[in-house]
């Protein structure tokens, strides 16, 4: 179930179907509304200001309401791939603020798991460079396993279009071979916490 907050519309409030929400905002000049994944997040947002949520993923902040939330002082990574293989992007953000620390791509002819792997290694290298020992969260068990094995075990085949991607994979594997990562890499619990804050919000 999703919850639709309308700050500005024919009627304001929290609605539980898109049809109800649409009645309030479609054709209404300057309508302000957003989708949330839990009632508690929706209620908190409704009593706040729309400007705090505009342009942010619908899942933003949901993890704050979990009985056992993730570590707030941490970083999250995620990837988005249109097709498999397809055009790939990945990024990293600070968990509690949502502030981006890097964004890479798009790269042609990649896969989501490859992007998740590269995102974790990119975050590990970036945080080591800055002397930050905070944990890194990923929602990909596959990518976490590849990082621990220090090998991108993808079936993706190299060609001219994805040559830059394979250069990044080689660099990532070399970094893992030469460095012992100080930052714990942890699994993001999507079921308990909602979408990871680094999510591209394209689902």
Image (cartoon, helix red, strand yellow):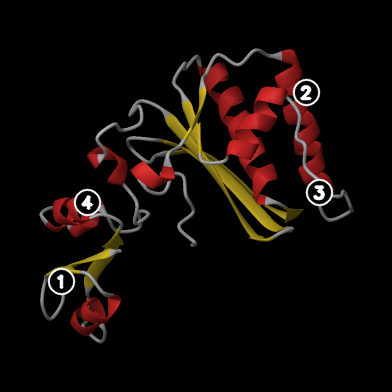
**Mark 2 vs 1, N-terminal side:** 1
Q: Secondary structure at mark 1?
A: strand
Alpha-carbon span between mark 4 and mark 3: 39 Å
Where the N terminus falls, by quadrant? bottom left
- CA gap between label 2 and label 1 equals 52 Å
Label number found at residue 174: 2
Disc 3 is placed on an element classified as loop
Residue mark closest to the camera, 2 vs 4:
4
Q: What's the CA distance linking mark 2 and mark 4?
A: 42 Å
- In which image quadrant can residue 144 be found? top right
Q: Residue 156, which numbered label? A: 3
> Counting other residues with Cα less than 10 Å from the Cα at mark 3, is it few (<14), some (14-19), or many (20 or more)?
some
In the picture of the structure, the residue carrying the numbered disc 1 is 8
Query: Rounded to the nearest whole Å, what is the CA distance between mark 2 and mark 3?
Result: 19 Å
Q: Is residue 73 above or below residue 36?
A: above
Please name the residue shown 22% across and 74% down the image.
31
The residue at the point 37 percent across, 41 percent down is 98
Q: Secondary structure at mark 2?
A: helix
């Amino acid at each position: 179930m999703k919850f639709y907050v309308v700050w500005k519309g024919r009627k304001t409030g929290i609605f539980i179907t898109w049809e109800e929400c649409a009645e309030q905002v479609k054709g209404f000049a300057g309508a302000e509304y957003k989708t949330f994944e839990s009632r508690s997040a929706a209620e908190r947002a409704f009593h706040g200001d729309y400007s705090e949520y505009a342009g942010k993923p619908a899942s933003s902040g949901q993890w704050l309401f979990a009985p056992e939330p993730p570590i707030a002082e941490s970083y999250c990574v995620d990837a988005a791939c249109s097709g498999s293989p397809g055009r790939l992007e990945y990024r990293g953000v600070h968990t509690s603020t949502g502030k981006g620390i890097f964004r890479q791509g798009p790269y042609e002819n990649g896969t989501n798991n490859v992007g998740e792997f590269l995102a974790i290694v990119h975050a590990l290298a970036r945080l080591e460079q800055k002397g930050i020992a905070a944990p890194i969260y990923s929602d990909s068990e596959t990518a976490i396993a590849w990082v621990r094995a220090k090998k991108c075990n993808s079936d993706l085949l190299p060609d001219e279009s994805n040559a830059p991607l394979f250069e990044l994979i080689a660099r990532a594997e070399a970094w893992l071979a030469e460095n012992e990562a100080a930052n714990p890499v942890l699994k993001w619990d999507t079921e308990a916490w909602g979408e990871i804050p680094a999510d591209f919000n394209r689902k």
